[in-house]
Image (spheres, helix red, strand yellow):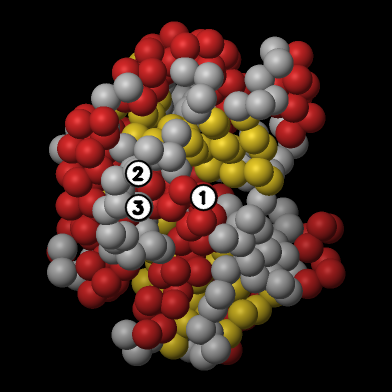
Amino acid sequence: MKILMVLFYGLNKGAGVERVGSMIANGLSEVGHDIILASLGPCDEPFFPLNEDIKVISLLGSARTNFAHTPYTVYKIRKLLKVEHVDVMIAVDTKSIPYTLPATLGLKVKHIGWEHFNFDPNEGISRDSIVRHLAARYCDSVVTLTKRDKEYWLKNTRHKSQVTAIANPCPFPIQEYIEENKKIVLAVGRLHREKGFDLLLEAWLQVASILPEWTLKIVGEGEERAQLTKFIEANQITESVELVGATDNVGHYYREAEIFCLSSRVEGFGMVLTDALSFGLPIVSFDCGPGPAEVLEGTGSILVPENNVDQLALALIGLMQDDEQKKTISLKGREKVEIYQPDHIISGDHPEFCVTAV
């Protein structure tokens, strides 16, 4: 089977959609499918490794800036579908749907829309909501990241397509549990408002006043670095907070941490949560969408009301002081994350997560 995967943002960034898109492409290639990655964004230097037999195509090339929102994009995708005799096309982000839907008109190509953000039934009319309704009506299948999102799609769209929940795979194998008092809280993500690191730093002011021997490390880079740095310096917490920046070895930071914290304002899935679970890290997270609640269910990890800085601080302090709770959560988390291992998702050992079953 020849599969075309269309990526909206490209391959050069180290963000979650690019990571999981690359992982699924590699996994499908390894089980025998011919994979083409077609990018609307930059793809000349893929951030994540790709198998050698995967074909990478820049749909727009140097014309990207001028033509990304014109019929030219539709023409390029349609031409590729015909030339390569594609059987299945996956729009890796539903932002690609306005281009991939018209590109498939009249062609015998199975069209899958892959949603990476949570469905907000109260969103009202927006570009994203319109695109979701188009996908539900005209794609052959829609893939959501959580079961709760699947229910939102089924209840709130006039769907003709199959709607399937398939979780993002975790790139890390389950690590051996090592009980150590490292006194490091880790957070990972783009330094962007939606990741809520400003809220985490406000909570850390309370944490550091009670447990000054602990360190907070934030791994990631982005537009809010200057603002976050200013807050750290103004509140004199430079000794206990480190903005690590971007890294190609995030596993090192998971290994050295004792607790993981997710402070996002909104999170469709939260791939960093499965990463943290695979390293046996107990987690404190905002209940900021369907992803965290579903991923952390049954692990004993702590969900606090979204954007509630005081509750986040209290939960962190409580967990930091309770070694037995940390150990219990760690063991349960490593058991839970088994279902997010790539082999289970690609091969269909858990049918509800099977990509090839869609």
Residue on which the image places disc 2: 180
What residue did someone put label 1 on?
A: 253
**Mark 3, secondary structure of its residue:** loop
Neighbourhood count class around disc 2 (C-alpha, 10 Å): few under 14, some 14–19, many 20 upward: few
- Residue highlighted by disc 3: 279
Among numbered discs 1 and 2, the one appearing first in the sequence: 2
Height in image: 252 above or below 261?
Answer: below
> Residue 269 sits in which quadrant?
top left
For label 3, the crowd category at 10 Å Cα-Cα, with few meaning under 14, some 14 to 19 and many 20 or more, is many
Q: Is residue 213 left or right of residue 190?
A: left
Q: Is residue 8 above or below residue 35?
A: above
Residue 27 in view of the camera: yes
Q: Position of residue 241 (x, y in %)?
A: 62, 29
Residue 45 x, y percent position in the rendering: 71, 72
What residue lies at 61% left-to-right and 61% top-to-bottom?
Answer: 248
Residue flagged by tag 3: what amino acid is it?
A: Phe
